[in-house]
Image (cartoon, helix red, strand yellow):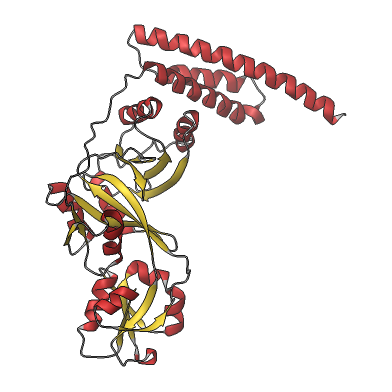
Amino acid sequence: MDLNLIRGEIDKIDEQLAELYERRTQLASDVAKYKKEHDMPVLQKDREEQILEKVGSSVSPELKNGVQLLFTTLMDLSKCRQQQLLTQQREFATVPPVAGRPVAATVTKGSYSADACEKFFGGSCDVRYFRNFNEVFEAVERGEVDYGVLPIENSTAGDVSTTYDLMGKHHFFICRTTKVHIDHVLAVKPGVDLSDITEIRSHEMALRQCSGFLAGNGAKTTVMRTTAEAAEYVAGLDADSCGAICSRSCAKMFGLTVAAENIADIKDNFTRFILISNRLEVPEDASVISLSLTIPHTPGSLYRLLTRFAYCGLNLSRIESKPIPSVFSDVKDDAFDVVFYLDFIGSIRSPDVVKLLNNLEDELKYYRFLGNYAEI
């Protein structure tokens, strides 16, 4: 058996398949025209099931799943083509950025969120400080502030779960994102030695990022709302046995000294922050689109969703799944259902992108467009 001869036969079959695919796509376009004229939906579930049953019975049993997957993909590509032809594009209603001195909501002075505010606005914003992330979302949603600043993921510790938990409960759009370098130190009261510390306080994410240092130190850990709150707490104590994990600038602001530096597990440590608003702002250089959605709890449903992005030539830069919160009770089918968060490279100024988003909104049980933005 000659390998080159075998490959030659495969090449001939591939050429035939390519020709047949082109013919099938043209026929699918004709189907789209017919459906448009007769006001028919793109998805014909009974027709798909008939085709899959027919092709599955036409091959040997061990090839049934494979040929059905092949034809499922072919039909998905046909639907993508038909949707491009049939979808009436619905434009997004965008607004310009707030002029003058925007008001940003963050957590507390001296926190890494405050550093993110500086990056977003260059120090020209009037910052109002809130006690927790939920209050930030609420202030933005009610229009009490123009913008909110929230951490969403860390390069070392992963997602900020509190932010994701709240994203499903509130109406907002992402306007911009930025990354802040995280440089944790252990801050203590002046004159206190590291050996005197029996308790260390900080935000849960900071504690996770410094797990190696904490394991070697042996001190008790206590979670605070922010790193800055932990530093302020330590500064106000009469006792000298407590320290805080925070930034060097935060320690200085509260009159603390650095007992240990470079204590993060990974030195190249960044947190990504999002700037949110209750208005849809899309800058000219917007290049990332974020969505949240649910898909049917059936085999291959995620694969079929991703096929639609691939067909449009769109690159998914991030995909996360989270348990569906209780507020999603109308779309929660069982305890293992999840909501997906997708980031992909694209712009709502592209007609093909807008049509895809319009289709997802029409077809999925739960779908939210979270914004089209750029990173600064």
Q: Residue at x 44, y 78 (%)?
A: 213
Which of the two residues, 175 or 8, is positioned nearer the viewer here?
Answer: 175
Q: Quadrant of residue 297?
A: top left
Q: Quadrant of residue 352?
A: top left
Decide if residue 189 is on the left or right side of residue 300: left
Query: In the picture, which quadrant includes the N terminus?
Result: top right
Can you give x and y, in whole percent of width and height, for residue 20 in the image? 61, 14
Whether residue 222 can be seen here: no
Q: Quadrant of residue 345?
A: top left
How many numbered discs, if any?
A: 0
Whether residue 200 can be seen here: yes
Can you give x and y, in whole percent of width and height, for residue 136 in the image? 19, 56
Q: Residue at x 83, y 28 (%)?
A: 4
Can you give x and y, in whole percent of width and height, for residue 106 in the image? 22, 60
Q: Residue at x 29, y 71 (%)?
A: 227
Q: On screen, 225 above or below 54?
A: below
Can you give x and y, in whole percent of width and height, for residue 31 in the image? 45, 10
Q: On screen, 254 above or below 116?
A: below
Q: Residue at x 25, y 77 (%)?
A: 253
Which of the two residues, 312 or 376, is positioned nearer the viewer here?
Answer: 376
